[in-house]
């Protein structure tokens, strides 16, 4: 059997890398089959993974002509803070698998491109090492099984000037990832996670206890825990992974200040409703100015436009920036962001929208 030759990361960007799809093809050459399976894979039949990308094909653009766009810009405002553009980096853990410089490279690229980055609890890079004065950074919290351990991470994020806490709520248990298991996926021996063990210690099972419901689910957060965290921090708390309108309303009731509409990239619950449909359902029930951020399947600047037209305040990319990281470190992540930002700007101009605030449902047609 031929062993795959894994290419070293590039230190300059070749001319043929011009789209996210180009980066996807290139990134595979720089990763082992096992890590590639981890990155690309999802849960079960991976229907949600594909749906997240395909759903944008059912939304057509409806441009307006002859408008004066000379005052145009991509600036957006979320929770009182202005961002240069609405393309943010989603929290992705264990980034050392993709490039030796890990999250430090992604953070550098995000800072240079003015992109908001959300640092994962499972970062290989200490949150304190990201530039303190960079205003475009949030911290993502995986619940640590108990309140005090979770709060310690929140307080550290406060001290180091992270601007929001993002609590991921859609993966209290790992999804059933067939592709990952078939590739015998495992993290490298000795990989450092400065803020948490790779696996939060499980409660001891007694006779008759159910391994799922008395195991991981026993230490998963509840609405009471969310309300408690909200009261303990002066940072806005945002929940990631909400798809049901009733949960959106409960989030507001418990003091949450924003939502990231996401099905975890199709990695947890296969055939979960696609985030673009969930976004529209949730938009109908929350206050008009309540921040809804979108996560899932963004591959083009026109996808960014469509998500914003349907009610998103900003969008997150996940796999696309990891393609850039695997290909060329910080340089690759920066180029991926630049590609999407330029595609979004040109889409805005051709659509007749000068500002992000002007983008709405009148500019799209859905089947």
Image (spheres, rainbow, N blue to C red):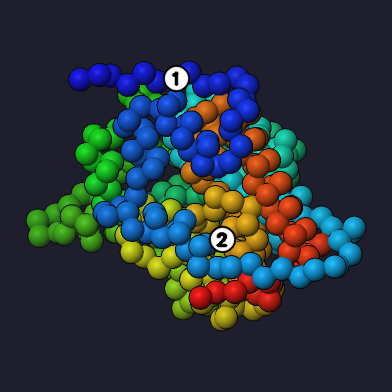
Q: CA distance from mark 2 to mark 1?
A: 33 Å
Kindly identify the residue that appears in the image at 51 percent across and 42 percent down: 21
Kindly identify the residue that appears in the image at 48 percent across and 31 percent down: 26
Query: Front-most of 149 and 345?
Result: 345
Query: Label 1's element?
Result: loop
Query: Label 2's element?
Result: strand
Locate residue 94: give its quadrant. top left
Locate residue 40: give its quadrant. top left
When the figure is inspected, residue 131 is found, relative to residue 284, above or below; the finding is above
Mark closer to the chain start, 2 or 1 = 1
Which residue is identified by label 1?
7
Kindly identify the residue that appears in the image at 56 percent across and 81 percent down: 285
Compared across the picture, whether 6 is left or right of 130 comes to: left
Compared across the picture, whether 4 is left or right of 301 comes to: left
Mark 1 surroundings: few (<14), some (14-19) or many (≥20) residues within 10 A: some
Query: Front-most of 28 and 195?
Result: 28
When the figure is inspected, residue 358 is found, relative to residue 6, above or below; the finding is below
Report whether residue 357 is seen. no
**Mark 2 or 1: the one toward you:** 1
Labelled disc at residue 271? none
Residue 178 lies, in percent from the top left, at 24, 47
Q: In the image as oriented, which residue stretches furthest toward the front?
A: 66
Which residue is identified by label 2?
294
């Amino acid at each position: 059997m031929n062993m795959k030759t894994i290419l070293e990361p590039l230190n300059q960007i070749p001319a043929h890398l011009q789209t996210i799809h180009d980066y996807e093809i290139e990134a595979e050459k720089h990763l082992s089959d096992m890590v590639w399976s981890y990155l690309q894979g999802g849960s079960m039949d991976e229907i949600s993974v594909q749906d997240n990308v395909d759903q944008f094909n059912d939304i057509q653009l409806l441009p307006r002509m002859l408008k004066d766009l000379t005052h145009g810009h991509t600036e957006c405002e979320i929770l009182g803070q202005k961002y240069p553009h609405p393309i943010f980096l989603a929290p992705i853990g264990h980034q050392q698998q993709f490039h030796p410089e890990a999250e430090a490279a992604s953070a550098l690229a995000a800072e240079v491109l003015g992109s908001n980055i959300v640092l994962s609890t499972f970062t290989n890079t200490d949150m304190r090492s990201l530039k303190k004065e960079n205003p475009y950074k949030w911290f993502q919290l995986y619940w640590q099984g108990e309140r005090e351990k979770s709060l310690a991470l929140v307080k550290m994020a406060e001290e180091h000037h992270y601007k929001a806490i993002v609590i991921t709520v859609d993966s209290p248990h790992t999804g059933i990832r067939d592709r990952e298991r078939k590739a015998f996926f495992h993290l490298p021996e000795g990989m450092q996670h400065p803020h948490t063990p790779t696996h939060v210690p499980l409660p001891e099972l007694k006779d008759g206890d159910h391994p799922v419901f008395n195991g991981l689910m026993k230490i998963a957060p509840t609405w009471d825990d969310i309300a408690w965290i909200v009261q303990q921090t002066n940072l806005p708390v945002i929940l990631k992974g909400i798809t049901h309108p009733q949960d959106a309303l409960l989030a507001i009731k418990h003091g949450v200040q924003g939502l990231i509409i996401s099905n975890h990239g199709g990695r947890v619950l296969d055939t979960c409703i696609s985030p673009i449909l969930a976004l529209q359902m949730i938009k109908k029930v929350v206050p008009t100015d309540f921040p809804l951020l979108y996560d899932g399947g963004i591959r083009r600047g026109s996808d960014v436009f469509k998500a914003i037209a349907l009610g998103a305040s900003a969008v997150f990319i996940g796999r696309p920036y990891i393609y850039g990281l695997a290909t060329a470190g910080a340089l690759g992540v920066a180029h991926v962001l630049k590609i999407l930002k330029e595609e979004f700007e040109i889409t805005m101009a051709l659509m007749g929208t000068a500002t992000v605030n002007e983008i709405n449902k009148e500019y799209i047609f859905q089947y």
